[in-house]
Amino acid sequence: MNKLLRILKHRWLDERDAERALGAEGIQRLESRVTESERRHIGEIRVCVESGLPLSYLWRNASARERAVSMFGKLRVWDTEHNSGVLIYLLLAEHRIEIVADRGLNRHVSAEEWQVILDTMRAEFRAGHFEDGLNRAIDAVDALMLKYLAAADGGANPNELSNRPVLR
């Protein structure tokens, strides 16, 4: 896609499109799902849905992956006690999905395992089922967290990051 068409596609959408894609109840359900998940493991899950990339990213033809890594830092997902944060990032303008995981979990999970999760989510997004795709991603990350970073019985398990999805 040429640069001008990409810019127009991304600028056409705004935060309201992200809200419409999930709906108020869907946003609440996603938040509840993350909250419930985090009770069982020492990981932190953040969900970020952006309608389109900022103009500075579009101008330099940056990828959705580059933006996801940037948001991983901006949302401080990297800043958890056990280095166990995971960002699930959805870019609506391109129906791109990215998962960025900190080293506490990423050292246990192969690139192929992450790819299976991404492929499953892409099928949901292509069908316009954004909430379902994000739920599947949360469930898949939850399963990995339980396998590798389960909370100790009776141990402290503070909620270090907001569970509410970020819409931009």
Image (cartoon, rainbow, N blue to C red):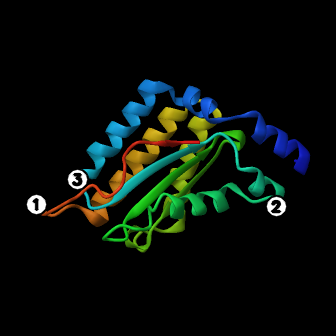
Q: Where is residue 108 in the image (x, y as percent from the top left)?
A: 40, 71
In the figure, 165 relative to 39: above or below?
above
Q: Do the residues labelled 1 and 2 touch (CB within 8 Å)?
A: no
Check the picture and name the quadrant holding the C terminus: top right
**86 and 60: which one is in front?**
60
Q: Nearer the viewer, mark 3 or mark 2?
A: 2
Q: Are marks 3 and 2 in contact (CB under 8 Å)?
A: no
> Which residue in the structure is indicated by mark 1?
153
> Which residue in the structure is indicated by mark 3?
40
The reply to whether residue 127 is in sight is no
Displayed quadrant of residue 32: top left
Looking at the rendered structure, the kind of residue marked 1 is Asp
Residue at image position (80%, 38%) is 9
The reply to whether residue 142 is in sight is yes
Residue at image position (44%, 61%) is 77
Judge the density around disc 1: few (<14), some (14-19), many (≥20) Cα neighbours within 10 Å: few
**112 and 2: which one is in front?**
2
Earlier sequence position, callout 1 versus callout 3: 3
SS class of the residue under badge 3?
Answer: loop
Looking at the rendered structure, the kind of residue marked 2 is Arg
Earlier sequence position, callout 3 versus callout 2: 3
> Which residue in the structure is indicated by mark 2?
60
State how far apart marks 3 and 2 are (Cα). Answer: 41 Å
State how far apart marks 1 and 2 are (Cα). Answer: 48 Å
In the figure, 137 relative to 65: above or below?
above
Q: Where is residue 141 in the image (x, y as percent from the top left)?
A: 40, 54
Judge the density around disc 3: few (<14), some (14-19), many (≥20) Cα neighbours within 10 Å: some
Looking at the rendered structure, the kind of residue marked 3 is Arg
Q: Nearer the viewer, mark 1 or mark 2?
A: 2
In the figure, 32 relative to 137: above or below?
above
Residue at image position (48%, 41%) is 134
132 sits to left or right of 50 = left
